[in-house]
Structure formats: C-alpha cells, structure tokens
Image (spheres, rainbow, N blue to C red):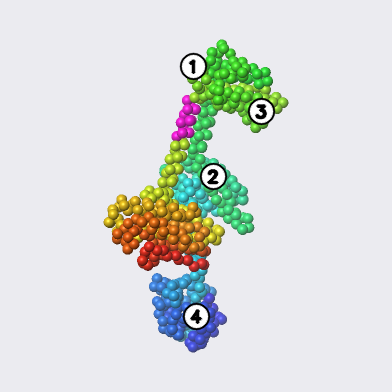
Amino acid sequence: MSDSTDRQDMGPDALLAALDTLGIPAAITTEDGGIIGLGRTWRDFAALDETAGGMAWDRLVPASHLDALRAWLTRMPCEGEAPALECPLAHASGAMRWHQLGKRLVASGEAVRWLCYATDIGALKRRETRLNDEASLQAKMLDVSVDCIKLIAPDGCLLHINRAGCLALGVSAEESVGKRWSSLLPEEIRASAEASLADATAGRTSRFPGRSVSDAMGEQFWDNLLTPVLDEDGGTRSVLCVSREVTAEHRAVQTLRENEGRLAMAAKVGGLGIWDYDIAGDRLHCDASWYRIMGRDPSDTIQTIAEFRPLIHPEDVDRATDVGRTASDLLAEDLDYSITFRVVRPNGDIRWVRSLAYLEQKEGRAVRAVGFVADITDAWRGELALRDANRALEEEKTSLARKVLEDPLTGISNRRHLDSELARVWVHANETAQPLCVGMIDVDRFKQFNDRYGHLAGDAALKRIAKALQGVARRTDLVARYGGEEFAFVLAGTADPTVTMDRFLDAVAGLAIPHEDSPTGRLSISGGVVVSLSVTESPKHLIQASDEALYEAKLGGRDRFVVRVLPGP
C-alpha cells in the first residue's frame, strides 16, 4: 500500500497523534522494526499502557511468528508492491487473534518511519479451518465406499480419487491426481472413457463398461456412471465418476452364454428332447429323446396335453399345461416360452426339466410352439444348494458387519460406529440448522475397582453399566463404548441434555454396584457434555470439548456432569 509519490512526511508527534484517530490497530515503527508508539485501538485491544512506546514485539505476537514479522517489518517493498502479512495478535483476554498486517511509509530521509496497521481476519481463518475439516471429513467418507469414486475436471484431469479407486487402478492418490484420467485406464477402454467424459462434460449423464487389472485385486470389471456437476450458470464444473464393480455379474453372464452355446450344440446332436405342439389342434409330437427324459417308452405315444398331464408333478401340472393362456401372455410381452417344472417317472423318480420354445403366431394368435426339454435335475439341485450357501453367506456378512460396529465386551456400539454416526449426524445438523449434543462418560475410580475386585468383576460391571446407559437413552440417541471405562454418546436435535444426563446418573446409581474405595460406596459415573447450537465445530473438536467438560466434572468431585454450551459463529 506504500506510495512514495503521494506521501507527505509527518513529524513524530503528529504521527503518534494520528494513530489514535484510526479505528483499527496501528503502530509507528522504525526502519529496523522497533515500535515507536501504538494507537489507542491497538492499546485497548491488547490492554496496554497509555503510550506503549519502546515496547517489544514479543508482547504483541507469539514467538512462532516473530522471525517472519521482523523480516517483513524491515523489508523495503518494490515499486507498486502492497506488502501484507498474516499474523496472530495478542488480545487482552490472553488469546491470539488472526490479523492481516499492512504497512505504509509515512516518513523518510534520515528517519524512516512506517505506519503498520492490522485488519481482523479471524472470521476468515475460522471459515478456512472449517472448510478444511469438512473437506477432510468428506474425503474420509468417500474412502469408506467400496465403489471407485473419481472427480474429473472438464479438461479430463483427475481432481480426486478415493481409496477404492486407488486399489482398483493400482495407483496412489498422490501420483494420479493431476494426470489425465483416461491415461490411468487400460488402453482398450480409453476411447469409450473419453467419449463418455465428453458427453458428461456437455451436461449429459453417460456410462460405459470398464476393466482394470492390478496386483492387489487382479482382473475386475466395472460399470462406470459419469454425472456432470453443474455450476450456478448451468455449466459443467466437474464430472463425478462412480464405478461399481460388476465382476461377479460379468462372469455370470459369460457363464450363461457359454451354457447357452453348449445347449444349442446339444440340441443339434440330439442330446435334448424335441417337441412340437399344434396349439389350435391340440396335437403334440415328441422325439425319442423327449420320451427318454420323461422316463417313458416312445411306443406309448403322448399326443395331447390331457395325455401329458399325468406325467407332471401335481404341484406343477396346471402351470405347465396352461398353454393357451401362457402363449397369450408371452405374445403380449413379445417373449419366447420358457418354463421349469417337475415330472414324475413311472418308478417314482422326480426330475426337474426346463422347457424352451419358439412361438409361431398367425394374425396375432399363437398357433404352434416348437421347442426342446432338458433334464436339469443335477443343476437345479446345485442351484438350490448355491442359494442356501448364498443365504448363509449373507447372514454371515450381516453378522460380521454387526460385529465390526459392536463392542465385543458390552455389545453396544464401538468407537468405529460412533465416529461414523457422529459424522452422519453432524452433516445432517449442518444442513438442517439443528442443535447437536456430544458427551463423554467415565466410570469413577474404575482402576481401584479392578484392583480390589479383579478384572472379571470389572468386565461384568462395564457390561451392566453399558446396558443401563443404553436402556435409558432415546431410540434416536447413540451410546458407544469409547475405550476402557469410557463411554461416549450423541444426542441429535437436543439443545438441553440435562434430562438425559440425569437418567444416565440415576441408571448407574440404581445398579448399586458395591465399591468400597468410593466415597459413595458404589460405582458411579462422571459426564461431560457440549451443546453446539450452530454446529460450527468439527466432530473431532466436539469430542475434544466434551472430554474437557468431563475432566471438569471429575475435578469437581465426580458422580456429576458438566454441560458446556459452545458459542455460535
């Protein structure tokens, strides 16, 4: 901001007098950075004496910023340069508050004098910290996803990639961000990727099939969905690419096609039973292989649907022989005939068969069906076994997922679940401007309890306390074991946690677990709660603040709780 052409040198007294007229913190300094005097606003801000002349900078700024400040104070700016420095200043409360410092040459010649002035940027710094915390939280949430998630610039360069994407492509985020996205993909799909990216950049959602090979994951197949992220003017600011792994589906389709090829080959060489049915005339003609599959003698011909019905299992007979209705439904949907049913052979053996056919139509009506049957008993039984195995696997996965989120000792939520749920509730509270309460609970004198009664008794006590806390919490609240004898909880949409904390204390007191080393003669708990009305703090900061409140409750004598209401922005 210095401008030597417009400057009018002022005497020392005039300079000092002018400082008091400024509404922002200001000082007059020497060429080597020494303080000649501070303005009234700065003196009031720092609670200093009337003149503050000859004061050292180490009383005004933290030691970590002194070297940078002195270098800035003694540097003569180049022509047209407006030097500025971000630096925290000491406040009368003892806290440090961020300001941006500027300087202007107000006297030169034999006595160089600088006007150094400060602008409060605390709000900007807090917003910057909050945005950084939110960005870090969002990145962590993306890393939880099993889908590969990429954010791509309109020019095709990669802006962000989550952990699953790095594993699938065999790259790290550091080496891939900034590179052209398609260059990280196998060469055979790059053209499709570029075409889809062009569509998404033009504002249209697009998708394409993908493939990746890595040492860690091997060969994988993907369904890639590209969605444009639009700016306020409707232009594409970036493209979100979500890649869902479809390796299992791809291999299933490939296997199905191979099986269909084998069936076609088998039909050509006579391995399947061929049948031909005149729907209008109710005349059925079948080859020898068809009779063999049914367990019948070809000489004992079956020529009508009525003659065919006794061969079919009673539970499937109506469904398998209602040809007229089935044909009409298939024609309405433009589908071919396909059905699986059971037949009963003369020796009582039950076999599963699949029948497929092509429907011939005339004037919109099915008049003939030509197809074949295959004995699929072994495959069907295998499929039923596979379904049972898959069902058992899903149950096992559900059980495993529950175990991952549960504390193995107490059975309530663990710290992993707490972190995940707190992140979700925190985002919701930000979006809806609702209050949020986060608290910590500690079992008083638990080490002495373990020493006197043993760890088995300690574990049993923690189980009872966890059950008691969980029992009095609302369905919308979350209570989790944080570690050791510490518990944590989240109360969404609550501005006053007093009722809940009273319930927690009463519930544990009601257990009446004896503890001879406690003044109360029983196990008790202490709690610390923070209430965030505007949710400007990050989840990490809320946990830290509640831990500090817990510490205050323990210092106050234990068997109590302390509530802190955090100030708004």
Taking the magenta stretch, the answer to whether it contains residue 373 is no
Identify the mark nearer the N-term, 3 or 4: 4
Task: Tell me the tag on residue 41.
Answer: 4
Identify the mark nearer the N-term, 4 or 2: 4
| Residue occupied by mark 3 | 328
Identify the mark nearer the N-term, 3 or 1: 3
Is label 2 in contact with label 1 (beta carbons under 8 Å)?
no
Amino acid at the residue labelled 3: Ser
**Main secondary structure found in the magenta portion:** helix
Q: Nearer the viewer, residue 268 or 127?
A: 127
Identify the mark nearer the N-term, 1 or 4: 4
Is label 4 in contact with label 2 (beta carbons under 8 Å)?
no
Considering the numbered disc 2 on the image, is that residue within a helix, a strand or a loop?
strand
Q: Quadrant of residue 358?
A: top right
Q: CA distance from mark 2 to mark 3?
A: 39 Å
Q: CA distance from mark 3 to mark 1?
A: 35 Å
Q: Nearer the viewer, residue 195 or 357?
A: 357
**Foreground mark, 4 or 2?**
4
Amino acid at the residue labelled 4: Thr
Q: Looking at the picture, does residue 34 appear above or below residue 279? A: below
At which x and y percent is residue 557? 36, 66
At which x and y percent is residue 404? 41, 47
Taking the magenta stretch, the answer to whether it contains residue 385 is yes
Amino acid at the residue labelled 1: Asn
Identify the mark nearer the N-term, 2 or 1: 2
Residue 385 in view in this figure: yes
Q: CA distance from mark 2 to mark 1?
A: 54 Å
Mark 4 neighbour density, 10 Å: few (under 14) some (14–19) many (20 or more): some
| Residue occupied by mark 2 | 224
Image position of 67 (left or right of 106): left
Q: CA distance from mark 4 to mark 2?
A: 60 Å
Segment colored magenta? 378-389
